Amino acid sequence: MKATILTIGNEILKGRTVNTNLAHIGRVLTYAGYEVFRALVVKDTLDDISWGIKSALSFSDFIVTSGGLGPTFDDMTVESISKALGIELEINGKAFAELETRYKERRLDFTEARMKMARLPKGADAIINPVGSAPGVMLRYEGKTILMLPGVPEEMKALLDIVLDKIKVPGRSYYEETATLQGIMESSLAPLIIREMKAGNGKIYIKSHPGLSETNERILEVEISSSDSTDMLAKENVKRAMENIRRDYRSYIGK
Amino acid sequence: MKATILTIGNEILKGRTVNTNLAHIGRVLTYAGYEVFRALVVKDTLDDISWGIKSALSFSDFIVTSGGLGPTFDDMTVESISKALGIELEINGKAFAELETRYKERRLDFTEARMKMARLPKGADAIINPVGSAPGVMLRYEGKTILMLPGVPEEMKALLDIVLDKIKVPGRSYYEETATLQGIMESSLAPLIIREMKAGNGKIYIKSHPGLSETNERILEVEISSSDSTDMLAKENVKRAMENIRRDYRSYIGK
């Protein structure tokens, strides 16, 4: 099951904000059994969000968007996606009731800008936001699912948590382990990685990441992961490959 | 001048690595006068990188890629981009000489996996990497420019620094300022933002970011930015709008 993550916001493109939302959503979806296939970052405009959602729908089954659900003029996600897909907006009863109550409690007017957060695509589910105002939105479209989350990280995380059980892919488990090796270059490890991936018959994925340790020594992180039908199988695949890599590494550095 | 940033690597999609490279490159390009238009993240495969570069070329003039320049099997950026654009690979004399010297100095074999880093698209410029092995690549293609940088952040930063003067957009200056406000909600500030943006005639961009202060109080960051033909004009645009916003904010909170 292929997933695409669409992050909306100029601040990500300008580098004002680091896209930690992508990392969090990517992590959650990977462990929920998805192949996180691509990620797109677009500006806060109708045209760009439309391009993003249409592109994502053309190559994935599940799309998670982050950003653009708030009350300001540049919060255009819901409107843009609805227009792009030709779905009408309507006041969502659940979202409206929740927002109305909250603003009343805080003795604030339920202004047009605030009411915008209750105007959702026809047929969409509102997910009440336990941290902030803007509700999340779950929309089914031509057999695919679009989950719209806010950009504020605390709100995005809380809403993703709420829907997690609903979005898990049945019969898909993911497992990964990372080893940190010293004294071996990436180019020396490369042939071992190819051998183990071949032996894994498409169920094993290995990647090396060169980097620096805290004491500024060159290290090589070797990440082995597997997706399989059960937790146990995925784990066994990883453990077997890791053992082989470690054995060859020890013999390479002469220990 | 529109720029697209293409990040290559499964580890970003799986959320193992936060895409700090996007933020750094986005920041540098913004201040260099570009409109950072979109960002794409793709897996380390020929098909995905091809899709990424072709998409980016279809909507931007300058493309910066990050990742996939190293010696391992999944470092496929150069090969994939060359194939996608129909450009032959050839041994780049500058890259070859540098790598050969370095491996000789370290008494390491110049293996096939290592030599791969010197095999660049015909006509491309190699940018010698002062921090790691893989050279950066600058390629002109049908009036557009593709800059390929490594994924290791220290290497990416060093190479981007080296080419910075060459890639700056002449006659485009960028300036921004951020104010942190308390005691006002995003939905209350929204009409003021719209007013100032209208007054700015397309040269002023204002965005509010709700968040939490270190003491866990709700704050609102208001970012005002401007692109104009000189540093002075961009700065004046921002200062004027900031003054108006601050004045209205003070009157809103009654100070």
Image: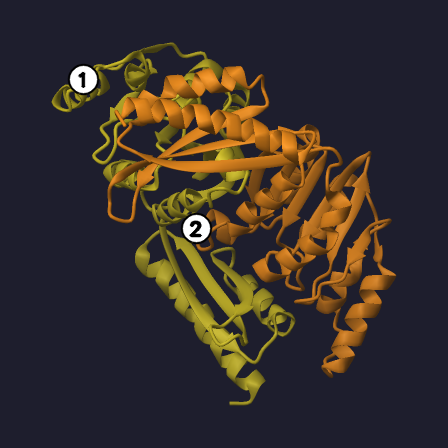
Chain colours: A orange, B yellow
Q: Name the chain under label 1.
A: B
Q: Who is closer to the viewer here, A164 or B207?
A: A164
Residue A15 — which label? 2
Which residue ends up furthest to the bottom in the rendered image? Answer: B255
Look at the picture and state if B112 lies above or below B16.
above
Q: Residue at x 50, y 39 (%)?
A: B12
Q: Residue at x 73, y 60 (%)?
A: A135
Q: Residue at x 47, y 64 (%)?
A: B223
B26 relative position to B110: left or right: right
Q: Dot 1: within a 10 Å radius of its alpha carbon, few (fewer than 14), some, or many (20 or more) residues?
A: some
Tell me which amino acid carries mark 2.
Gly
Q: Residue at x 46, y 38 (%)?
A: B2
A53 relative position to B14: left or right: right
In the rendered view of the protein, which quadrant contains the C terminus of chain A? top left
**Mark 2 or 1, which is nearer the eye?**
1
Residue at numbered disc 1: B100
Same chain check for tags 2 and 1: no
In the rendered view of the protein, which quadrant contains the N terminus of chain A? top right
Residues at badges 2 and 1 in contact (C-beta under 8 Å)?
Answer: no
